[in-house]
Image: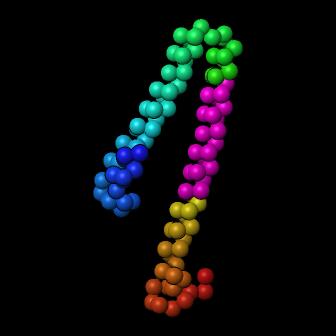
């Protein structure tokens, strides 16, 4: 939560370092929590069905994450292509000379 208060604005030169920190800490916490649950299952001497169930849940969550990542990249690439098309036609629909283009 403390990192939220220290987050620089999107155009700040240190934002890339903050993003790296944010993603690194997030993924580290996810990995440690998965390991912790496996250790807990081992300590409790749980039946194998619980371990297999947990692995199935992890696989399902990973598959959902991959699908959502693909959808996100599709949206990002479409936005980039739309923005590049708009920039070729001038700002605010003008042709660069202040005259509206027919497009």
Q: Specify the quadrant of the image occupied by residue 40.
A: top right
By what rule are the colours in the image chosen?
rainbow
Q: Quadrant of the C terminus?
A: bottom right
The residue furthest bottom is 99
Q: Is residue 33 visible?
A: yes
Residue 26 at what x, y percent from top left? 45, 38
Viewed as shown, does residue 44 lie left or right of 3?
right
Q: Residue at x 59, y 8 (%)?
A: 45
Q: Quadrant of the N terminus?
A: top left
Residue 51 at what x, y percent from top left? 63, 16
Q: Nearer the viewer, residue 11 or 35?
A: 35
Viewed as shown, does residue 84 lie left or right of 75?
left
10 w.r.t. 99: above or below: above
Q: Is residue 94 magenta?
A: no
Q: Residue at x 64, y 38 (%)?
A: 64
Q: Is residue 16 visible?
A: no
The residue furthest left is 13
Q: Residue at x 68, y 21 (%)?
A: 53
Viewed as shown, does residue 43 lie left or right of 54?
left
42 w.r.t. 83: above or below: above
Residue 49 at what x, y percent from top left? 69, 14
Viewed as shown, does residue 18 lie left or right of 26?
left
Q: Specify the quadrant of the image occupied by residue 25.
A: top left
52 w.r.t. 91: above or below: above
Q: Nearer the viewer, residue 103 or 70?
A: 70
Q: Residue at x 58, y 45 (%)?
A: 69
Residue bounds of the magenta highlight = 56-76
Q: Is residue 68 magenta?
A: yes
What main secondary structure does the magenta stretch of the protein show?
Answer: helix
């Amino acid at each position: 939560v403390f990192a939220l208060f220290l987050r620089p604005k999107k155009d700040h030169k240190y934002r890339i370092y903050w993003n790296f920190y944010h993603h690194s800490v997030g993924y580290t916490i996810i990995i440690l929590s998965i390991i912790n649950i496996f250790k807990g299952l081992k300590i409790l001497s749980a039946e194998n069905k619980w371990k297999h169930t947990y692995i199935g849940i992890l696989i399902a969550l990973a598959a959902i994450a991959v699908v959502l990542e693909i959808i996100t990249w599709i949206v990002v690439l479409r936005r980039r292509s739309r923005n590049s098309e708009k920039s070729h036609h001038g700002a605010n629909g003008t042709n660069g000379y202040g005259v509206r283009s027919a497009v």
